[in-house]
Image (cartoon, helix red, strand yellow):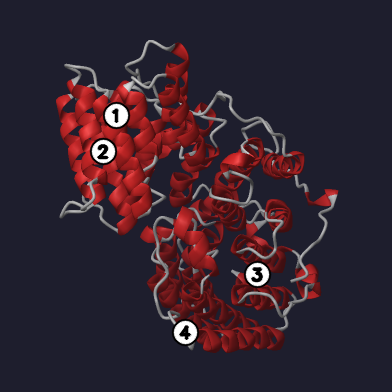
């Protein structure tokens, strides 16, 4: 796919906020910083970095260097800096082989986390290290002995009947109950209880949330507790509870890219889309800087969480209507994922085309598709062209792009596994693969074609027909990508139900438009365009006060100029 364009200085729009700085500049500068870090690729391995977390854990060692590496490794463990964690904790154990907690932590780093599973071979290797830890536990140290035994249970050759991670979580919970004021054990336990959520087992969430709330009551700036509390409340459907912590997590761990990003899980669910866009740009910069510095550990930019942050940030920018930042994200697809043969590039470049179609129609129509493009890229290529033609008011051309997507959809439906629902959690690992897989392409194609068909009907003045199309497409979107499992980040860039609301509004069915807008906002809160439709639906029913309130909310949330000027046909 020919996908390269330059962004002019005119893109940097002034949007002053209470932050005292142009928020668009902040996001764009962060992405530019990521690009500079990628180009620099400065090697700086084997050192302890500041700003990766606030957790404290005293090891059973008198060696200050071993303690330093142990403390560092514990913080990077909680910050999901996986390769760096393994190196740090192995070094701590090497510096003091008699430090049982150092060896225990080394074994812990070799096991699963919420976002990564391990192979049977890796499990066996982790058990060998846990057994080594058991041999150096000091007499009378019941706390350490219990922690080591929990790992031995987790890694035993034959998995416990309830599952390795479930058994591990229960064992850790028993230890936490014995030491209720031990924050180090508490945060480890909470993570252990949440890990089964990777397999859609949420049975440990309530207990994890209880543990974390106790820790945060004692230590509100405990980064590990904040990290896991964001996950626990998100999975449990109580995301707003974590918002006060989510807003400050990045500043508490500015050198841990995943923690700089992590607060946006909560922000996305409560509708703080501009903040999502900027924070993920900042996380990408940290990932690029540290990835370059730790390239021998496999953390180079474009791997692990970089794509996740990219897709999250792009989603936030698009929902906020932030033209400049959305296009900067789109431009970064090639620079941030330079190997065009990878699924990461295919995913990033495909998703970024939405920004080009919406905010740079002429550029979208100038792009060309290559025979080597993946189906995902081809689907989004036609979708971007459809959005561009919609902006130009060419209904016939929009419909042709929808039909091209339908052809791709029919081809995809014939492939093995194409009817399988794409997995929802955790998107950090599975999301990248699923976005580029044939299993995910089918619902994406269905939604993309439906949106364009609905847009074409709106442009023809057939609002009632558009409402039928958008209703069908919204149902398809919500079935394939239910928000509780697919907001990490959203597989599709906006709620199609808001288009249904716009169609009902254009048809003069104000009550129906109001209901559809409320339904959309229930899962995608503070969506400026849905709020704008809701305001007009209220006005159409004579409720001027409510209309003024929703209009004010829409203006506050929108970063794309006058929200009232966005054509209903494009909502």
Asked if labels 3 and 4 touch by Cβ distance under 8 angstroms, the answer is no
Q: Residues within 10 Å of mark 3 (few under 14, many from 20)?
A: few
Which of the two discs, 1 and 2, labels the residue nearer the N terminus?
A: 1
Task: Tell me whether circle 1 and circle 2 mark residues in contact (CB < 8 Å).
Answer: yes
Q: Earlier in the sequence, mark 3 or mark 2?
A: 2
Report the mark closest to the observer, 4 or 2. Answer: 2
Of badges 4 and 3, the one in the foreground is: 4
Q: Which residue shows up at 57% across the image and 25% down it?
A: 49
N-term mark: 1 or 4: 1
Label 3 sits on residue: 567
Q: Which residue is mark 4?
A: 468
Label 1: state its secondary structure.
helix
Label 3, label 2: how far apart the Cα atoms are: 58 Å
Q: Which residue is denoted by mark 1 in the rendering? A: 133
Residue at 27% over, 45% down: 155
Q: Say if residue 375 shows up in the picture.
A: yes
Q: Nearer the viewer, mark 3 or mark 1?
A: 1
Labelled disc at residue 96: none
Which image quadrant for residue 293?
top right
Mark 3 and mark 1: span between their CA atoms?
Answer: 65 Å
Q: Earlier in the sequence, mark 4 or mark 2?
A: 2
* Residue 151, numbered circle: 2
Up the image or down, 152 lies above or below 199; here it is above
């Amino acid at each position: 796919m020919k996908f390269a364009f330059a962004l002019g200085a005119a893109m940097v729009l002034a949007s002053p906020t209470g932050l005292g700085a142009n928020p668009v500049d902040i996001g764009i500068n962060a992405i530019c910083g990521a690009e500079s870090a990628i180009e620099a690729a400065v090697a700086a391995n084997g050192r302890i970095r500041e700003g990766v977390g606030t957790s404290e854990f005293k090891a059973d060692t008198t060696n200050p260097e071993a303690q330093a590496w142990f403390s560092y490794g514990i913080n990077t463990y909680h910050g999901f800096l996986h390769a760096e964690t393994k190196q740090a904790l192995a070094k701590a154990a090497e510096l003091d082989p008699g430090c049982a907690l150092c060896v225990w932590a080394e074994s812990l780093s070799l096991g699963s986390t919420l976002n990564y599973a391990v192979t049977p071979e890796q499990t066996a290797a982790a058990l060998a290290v846990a057994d080594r830890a058991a041999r150096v536990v000091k007499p009378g140290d019941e706390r350490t002995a219990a922690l080591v035994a929990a790992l031995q249970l987790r890694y035993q050759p034959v998995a416990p009947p309830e599952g390795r991670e479930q058994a591990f979580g229960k064992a850790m919970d028993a230890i936490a109950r014995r030491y209720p004021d031990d924050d180090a054990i508490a945060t480890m336990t909470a993570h252990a209880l949440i890990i089964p959520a990777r397999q859609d087992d949420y049975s440990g969430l309530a207990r994890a949330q209880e543990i974390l709330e106790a820790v945060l009551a004692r230590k509100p700036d405990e980064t590990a507790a904040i990290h896991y509390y964001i996950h626990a409340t998100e999975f449990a459907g109580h995301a707003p509870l974590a918002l006060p912590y989510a807003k400050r997590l990045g500043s508490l761990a500015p050198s841990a890219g995943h923690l700089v990003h992590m607060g946006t899980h909560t922000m996305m669910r409560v509708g703080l889309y501009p903040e999502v866009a900027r924070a993920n740009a900042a996380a990408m910069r940290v990932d690029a800087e540290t990835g370059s510095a730790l390239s021998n550990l496999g953390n180079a930019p474009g791997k692990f969480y970089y794509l996740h942050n990219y897709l999250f940030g792009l989603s936030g920018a698009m929902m906020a209507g932030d033209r400049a930042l959305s296009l900067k994200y789109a431009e970064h697809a090639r620079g941030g994922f330079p190997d065009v043969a990878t699924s990461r590039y295919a995913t990033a470049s495909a998703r970024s085309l939405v920004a080009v179609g919406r905010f740079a129609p002429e550029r979208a129509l100038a792009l060309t598709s290559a025979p080597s493009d993946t189906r995902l890229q081809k689907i989004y290529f036609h979708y971007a062209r459809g959005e561009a033609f919609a902006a130009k008011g060419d209904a016939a051309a929009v419909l042709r792009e929808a039909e091209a997507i339908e052809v791709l959809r029919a081809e995809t439906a014939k492939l093995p596994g194409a009817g399988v629902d794409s997995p929802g959690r955790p998107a950090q690992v599975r999301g990248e693969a699923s976005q580029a897989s044939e299993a995910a392409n089918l619902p994406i194609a269905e939604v993309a074609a439906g949106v364009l068909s609905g847009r074409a009907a709106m442009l023809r003045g057939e609002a009632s027909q558009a409402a039928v199309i958008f209703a069908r497409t919204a149902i398809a979107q919500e079935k394939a990508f239910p928000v509780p499992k697919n907001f990490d980040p959203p597989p599709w860039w906006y709620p199609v139900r808001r288009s249904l609301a716009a169609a009902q509004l254009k048809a003069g069915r104000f009550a129906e438009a109001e209901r559809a807008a409320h339904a959309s906002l229930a899962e995608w809160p503070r969506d400026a365009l849905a709020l704008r439709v809701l305001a007009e639906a209220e006005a159409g029913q004579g409720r001027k006060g409510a209309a003024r309130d929703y209009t004010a909310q829409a203006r506050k949330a929108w970063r794309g100029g006058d929200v009232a000027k966005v054509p209903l046909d494009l909502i």
